[in-house]
Image (cartoon, grey):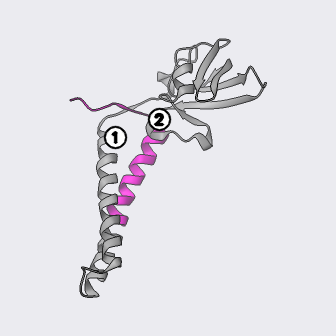
Amino acid sequence: MSEKEVILTPEGLAKLENELEELKTVKRKEVAARIKEAISFGDISENSEYEEAKNEQAFIEGRILTLEKMLRNARIITNKDVDTGVVNVGATVRLKDLEFGDVVEYTIVGSAESDPMNNKISNESPVGQALLGKAKGSTVDVNVPAGVIQYEILDITL
């Protein structure tokens, strides 16, 4: 079974690489030291510090594997890959909510670097999916749990 391609911007790639490096060089050593200290307390069968450290170690190792897999399957989207004639991953899109008149701006990114609090939405999200391939001036319908939101694409930039 082929692995899923992970679409990243150069910024997203750097962020994942930095997280992986931090986990491998710092967090692994920290948790190993905590495990060693917890073992020194004696009986580990009822040692909560030991259990907590082992759980954290398992989480860190799982995250390292996930990040390595994501980086192995990464496709980097640069500005030269983005056609501002239509919405693509890497583009910044300014939208007008046709019901309320609100104007919002989103950058379309791959799911690995999605950060809605910073207006970075995934190409796999309902809004991202509805926008992909659409041109400036288009009206798009976005199906959300509360119904349908209509947006007009005001601008597409890098």
Residue placed under numbered mark 1 in the picture: 70
Q: Is residue 130 left or right of residue 44?
A: right
Total marks placed: 2
Q: Which mark is residue 9?
A: 2
Give the amino acid type for the residue marked by disc 1 in the picture.
Answer: Met
SS at circle 1: helix
Crowd band around label 2 with a 10 angstrom C-alpha radius: few (<14), some (14–19), many (20+):
many
Crowd band around label 1 with a 10 angstrom C-alpha radius: few (<14), some (14–19), many (20+):
many
Q: Is residue 115 left or right of residue 81?
A: right
Quarter of the view holding residue 53: bottom left
Query: Taking 70 as reference, is 38 above or below it?
Result: below
Quarter of the view holding residue 138: top right
Q: Residue placed farthest to the front in the image?
A: 146
Residue 158, given in percent of the width and then of the height, sits at 59, 27
Query: Residues under labels 2 and 1: Cα distance?
Result: 13 Å
Residue 21: say if magenta. yes
- Front position among marks 2 and 1: 1
Q: Quadrant of the N terminus?
A: top left
* Nearer-the-camera pick, 103 or 20: 103
* Nearer-the-camera pick, 76 or 103: 103
Residue displayed at 48% across by 40% down:
113
Residue 80, given in percent of the width and then of the height, sits at 49, 23
Can residue 154 be seen? no
Span colored in magenta: 1-28
Query: Taking 106 as reference, is 63 above or below it?
Result: below
The earlier-in-sequence mark between 2 and 1 is: 2
Residue 51, given in percent of the width and then of the height, sits at 31, 72
Give the amino acid type for the residue marked by disc 2 in the picture.
Answer: Thr
Residue displayed at 35% across by 78% down:
49
| Main SS category, magenta section | helix
Residue 135, given in percent of the width and then of the height, sits at 60, 12
SS at circle 2: loop
